[in-house]
Image (cartoon, rainbow, N blue to C red):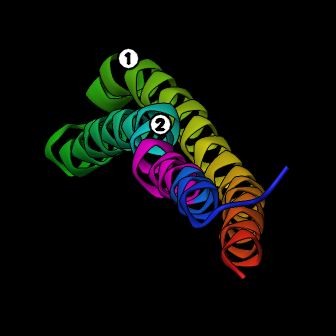
Amino acid sequence: MIYTFGDLLRDVHTTQEVFFSQLKNTFLEYISDFENRFIGPIASAKHRYMKSFDSFYGLIQMMPNFTKKQKGFQLEPKILEAKRMMDSDKINYLDSVNDLIIHSKIDLVDQICVSIYAFTSMFKQAN
């Protein structure tokens, strides 16, 4: 069978389509998926942490306004609960950030390697 110029152009076009779809999957869809998986939960965890942080330090700032007897009965349980919530939210927030750091590097490098393979195979087919 003779490999004609038309067959060559068709093969080059096919490898170009594979390359461009791989670029789309690597960067556009990956970034969208990455945002849904990591950025949204991190933003909500940060919002919860900042809210509990403000609540805790708001109670701390109220302490000088109370007498010693009022502080013990009214504020201490609230402060301890707010501190516990703030620490819990801080740990959740930092855990989310650590997941982001770990997964972003591995996933992105993997997608870039696949994209480079598609790129080189396209040019190999074109030669």
Majority secondary structure of the magenta segment? helix
Point out the residue furthest to the front here: 1
Secondary-structure class at tag 1: helix
Spatial CA distance of label 1 from label 2 is: 49 Å
| Residue at which label 2 appears | 33
Q: Say which of marks 1 and 2 sits in front.
A: 2
Q: Which residues are magenta?
A: 16-31
Secondary-structure class at tag 2: helix
In the figure, is residue 120 to the left or right of 53?
right
Point out the residue furthest to the left here: 65
- The residue carrying pointer 1 sits among few (fewer than 14), some (14 to 19) or many (20 or more) residues within 10 Å by Cα, namely few
Q: Is residue 30 magenta?
A: yes
Question: Of the residues under marks 1 and 2, which one precedes in the sequence?
Answer: 2
Between residues 99 and 26, which one lies in front from this camera angle? 26
Q: Amino acid at mark 2?
A: Asp
On the image, the x and y values in percent for residue 15 come to 61, 57
| Residue at which label 1 appears | 73
Quadrant of the image for the C terminus? bottom right
In the figure, is residue 61 to the left or right of 34?
left
On the image, the x and y values in percent for residue 48 come to 36, 32
Point out the residue furthest to the bottom here: 127
Q: Amino acid at mark 1?
A: Phe
Does the CB distance between marks 1 and 2 fall below 8 Å?
A: no
